[in-house]
Amino acid sequence: MNKPYAKVVVYGSPISKSNFKLFNTQGRAILPYNSGKYHDRYALYEEEIAIHTRAQNPNLILTEGLIAILKVYYKSEKRHPDTNNITKSIFDGIEKSGLIINDAQIRKIIIEEFYDKENPRFELELFGESSFKMDYKIIERDTPVNKLQYSPPPNKTQNIINKSEVAIKKQVLKDICSICGKIIKNDNYITADKGKTIICKNCLNKVL
């Protein structure tokens, strides 16, 4: 008796579903496939996954709970889709092939990210839980390797800087008396106008 197992390998740069959505006049997200435009790419990719899946696993249908091991190979370390979003794209195609009934069958999953400039692809293995179980561990490296550092996109970086500048300005204004303009130390002040006005106690004594 064959154990419940399947493997799928699809070559080409994996793509994310979220990058190819359009919206109709009612505001609902749609995924076109015959518009003749760039947005057709996702639907065509989904079809490609389905075709390769069925060709590599003829006459096989997995109906039980599954463990998935997904290895995604990108062309570049710096520019590629969010790997967490890639899983939806891949399992949509796998489900469409008929290999699985529903992607809700994936009860455990490990995703690994790799880089292969010459052969970008994904490799997916599916194991039926009736015959297989997952056992993994994380161990400390004997010799540390170079860190793969991540940074926010330029527009997000600027937003962070802008927010920091605003926070600093608010803090500076908070520490200055609204009447004399001097810096207030040791919380020696009172507030008015719902905290918008700050008056040091020296100015308050003069007014009183």
Image (cartoon, grey):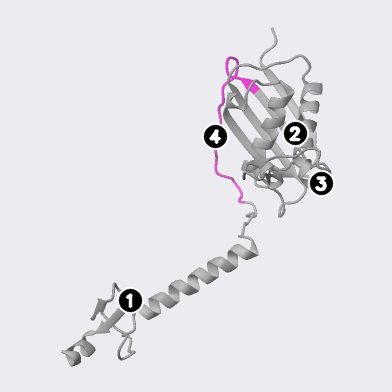
Q: Badge 3: few (under 14), some or many (20 or more) residues near its Cα, within 10 Å? A: few
Circle 4 sits on which residue?
137
Asked if disc 3 and disc 4 are in contact, CB closer than 8 Å, the reply is no
Circle 2 sits on which residue?
46
Query: Which label sits on residue 15?
Result: none
Circle 3 sits on which residue?
37
Above or below residue 97? Residue 192 is below
Q: Secondary structure at mark 2?
A: helix
Query: Which label sits on residue 196?
Result: 1
Marks 3/4: CA distance?
Answer: 45 Å
Rendered-image quadrant of the N terminus: top right
Q: Secondary structure at mark 4?
A: loop
What amino acid is at disc 1? Lys
| Of callouts 2 and 4, the N-terminal one | 2
Q: Quadrant of residue 30?
A: top right
What amino acid is at disc 3? Lys
What amino acid is at disc 4? Lys
In depth, the one of 117 and 190 nearer the eye is 190
Q: Residue at x 26, y 77 (%)?
A: 192
In depth, the one of 63 and 186 nearer the eye is 63
In the image, is 199 to the left or to the right of 42? left
- Residue 158: x and y in percent read 59, 68
Marks 3/2: CA distance?
Answer: 16 Å
| Of callouts 1 and 4, the N-terminal one | 4
Asked if disc 1 and disc 3 are in contact, CB closer than 8 Å, the reply is no
